[in-house]
Image (cartoon, rainbow, N blue to C red):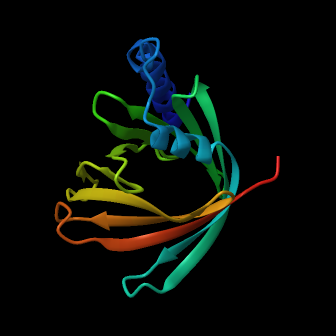
Amino acid sequence: MTLFQQVSSLVASILLSSACCLAQPAGSIIPMEAQKRLDHIIGNWSFRTDYLGQNGDVRRSVTGIEEATYLIGKQVVELTTRLSGATSKGWLFYDLTQERFQLTSVDARGDLWILSGGLEEYVITSEPKKQRNGRELTIRFTHRNIKEDSFEAVMETSIDGGESWWKRSIQYLKRENN
């Protein structure tokens, strides 16, 4: 079993074993806006990601597919991203206790990211995470230009705890006809 498969299995086990915590008591529902956002991403999406240089110029572009399905009721979304032969997984849900979206993501290298964001904006941000070079890195994703069948996801990074941000990529997603 590869490292990615091991980490993916571990994260899935953690999520599934905590399903009792995610399941809400009868009559308890997540806010309508949170449910609307979860419902919106369900489906198959094709995308192009433009990776940006420090001046904002496009350095390279790649294409891929993202599939979003409900894993536990209409509470936990499993995201599978396929890009240039690599696969990453993510699990997104709205946490009623924290009143925030929570995203756990494992990329093809086995890197684990945990991000969160509220309902006030379409932004989800990680905690600072130590990188191989010893620096702390924070990432955030902002969804914009949201339509029924398309949206954009801007990824920014910070190495100073969020004091300044560098726009690293823009992903253009379009819903596939199923």
x 37%, y 83%: residue? 54
Asked where in the image residue 95 lies, by quadrant, the reply is top left
Note whether 167 is above or below 54 in the view shown.
Answer: above
Q: Position of residue 83 (x, y in %)?
A: 63, 56
Q: Of all residues shown, which one is farthest toward the right?
A: 178
Asked where in the image residue 140 lies, by quadrant, the reply is bottom left
Q: Position of residue 89 (x, y in %)?
A: 54, 40
How many numbered marks are there?
0
- Quadrant housing the N terminus: top right
Asked where in the image residue 17 lies, by quadrant, the reply is top left
Q: Position of residue 144 (x, y in %)?
A: 49, 66
Viewer-nearest residue: 36 or 117 = 36
Viewer-nearest residue: 103 or 50 = 103
**Residue 130 falls left or right of residue 11:** left
x 43%, y 35%: residue? 31
x 20%, y 59%: residue? 135
Note whether 8 is above or below 155 in the view shown.
Answer: above
Viewer-nearest residue: 38 or 53 = 38
**Residue 134 falls left or right of residue 14:** left
Note whether 125 is above or below 162 in the view shown.
Answer: above
x 42%, y 12%: residue? 25
Q: Position of residue 156 (x, y in %)?
A: 36, 66
